[in-house]
Amino acid sequence: MRLGSPKSFDLITDPKEEYPATGMRNTWHAEPALRIVSEFEKSLKQHPPIAPGTPDPYTPPT
């Protein structure tokens, strides 16, 4: 599954987070947010998520 782009909200003018701010790529927080998403996606290759419907208790493959 591919993750979507992170959204940013102006909590002063939109405290209910109903309208994402536009132009996130031009803001100071775009680079750190996208770096975190990229690192998370890389970690999924090394440690794949547990598939839905997997019996509990989960035993990782060897």
Image (cartoon, rainbow, N blue to C red):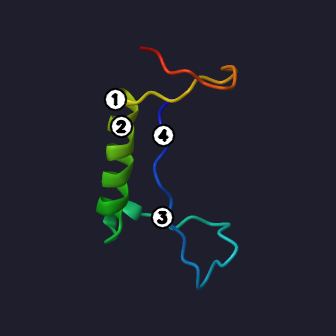
Q: Say if mark 1 contacts mark 2, CB within 8 Å.
A: yes
Identify which amino acid the numbered label 1 is placed on: Gln
Reply above or below: 41 against 51. Answer: below
The secondary element bearing badge 3 is classed as loop
Q: Give the CA distance from mark 1 to mark 4.
A: 17 Å
The residue at 58%/79% (across/down) is 11
Identify which amino acid the numbered label 2 is placed on: Ser
Number of other residues with Cα within 10 Å of mark 4, as a class: few under 14, some 14 to 19, many 20 or more = few
Q: Give the CA distance from mark 2 to mark 3.
A: 28 Å
Q: Quadrant of residue 42?
A: top left
Residue lying furthest bottom: 12
Q: Is residue 57 left or right of residue 35?
A: right
Residue with the mark numbered 2: 43
Viewer-nearest residue: 61 or 1: 61
Residue with the mark numbered 4: 3
Residue with the mark numbered 1: 46
Residue with the mark numbered 3: 22
Identify which amino acid the numbered label 4 is placed on: Leu
The x, y position of residue 21, in whole percent, is: 51, 68
Q: Say if mark 4 contacts mark 2, CB within 8 Å.
A: no
The residue at 56%/64% (across/down) is 20
Front: mark 4 or 2? 2
The x, y position of residue 59, in whole percent, is: 55, 21
